[in-house]
Amino acid sequence: DAGVIQSPRHEVTEMGQEVTLRCKPISGHDYLFWYRQTMMRGLELLIYFNNNVPIDDSGMPEDRFSAKMPNASFSTLKIQPSEPRDSAVYFCASSLVALPGTQYFGPGTRLTVL
Amino acid sequence: AQKITQTQPGMFVQEKEAVTLDCTYDTSDQSYGLFWYKQPSSGEMIFLIYQGSYDEQNATEGRYSLNFQKARKSANLVISASQLGDSAMYFCAMREAGGGGSNYKLTFGKGTLLTVNP
């Protein structure tokens, strides 16, 4: 079975540019989560969706960040405009309502903003 | 206050020996879940083991077991017969029930870097 798929795996961009990260959750999973990992702050939850509906976006750092889930098999995290402090690894994870908390992570996108 | 505390930034163990990674948690919920994830140098996060707050027996998954001491609010991960491939960062995480009982968020600790020596 395919796991969570993220693209791109690596992204290097310049400050001020728009960045779009993509995620395909495991088929049949009800929940989708976006995390950011940095050395300083560790693993932080940004936002999560249930059945394509955003449930909690309290971790989104500021208005430059936005996330969408237009259907059950696709989600995007957009940063516009990007800043050097956004450099991090961004993970997408999905889980089943029947197994709350057991989240399966994608390989991550390493974002570098110059 | 931190919800998940992992006091060991780094641990070393000899191959084939057992190792315990510490995790303490803080919650006022009666229903919660505790998780351990492994992050090797390649970067992916791998789910290892889960313990529910109402589970009376410690969870086990192959060489992994979770030493759950509810009164002490600790959920230590025990890896038996360490292998070189166990070298990785290990994260403890907690899911609290939340007000509506439908909180699916995980709070992660800072992690412990385990190095297995040959």
Image (spheres, rainbow, N blue to C red):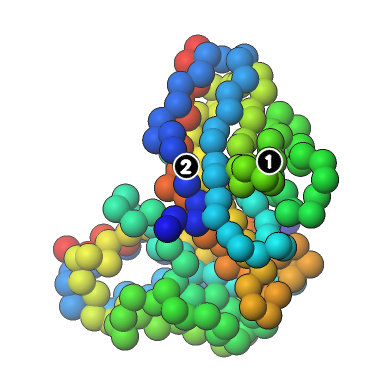
Q: Amino acid at mark 1?
A: Gln
A6 left or right of A103 in image? left
B19 left or right of A82 in image? right
Q: Are marks 1 and 2 on the same chain?
A: yes
In the structure shown, which secondary structural element does the residue marked by tag 2 occupy?
A: loop
Q: Chain of mark 1?
A: B
Q: Percent x, y for residue A56?
A: 52, 80
Where A104 sits versus B64, above or below?
below
Residue B69 got which mark? 1
Q: Quadrant of the N terminus of chain A?
A: bottom right
Write down the quadrant of residue B71 in the picture: top right
Write down the quadrant of residue B75 in the picture: top right
Q: Residues within 10 Å of mark 2 (few under 14, many from 20)?
A: many
- In this orientation, which residue lies closer to the viewer: B28 or B36? B28
Q: Residues within 10 Å of mark 1 (few under 14, many from 20)?
A: few
Write down the quadrant of residue A59 in the picture: bottom left
- Mark 2 = which residue? B6
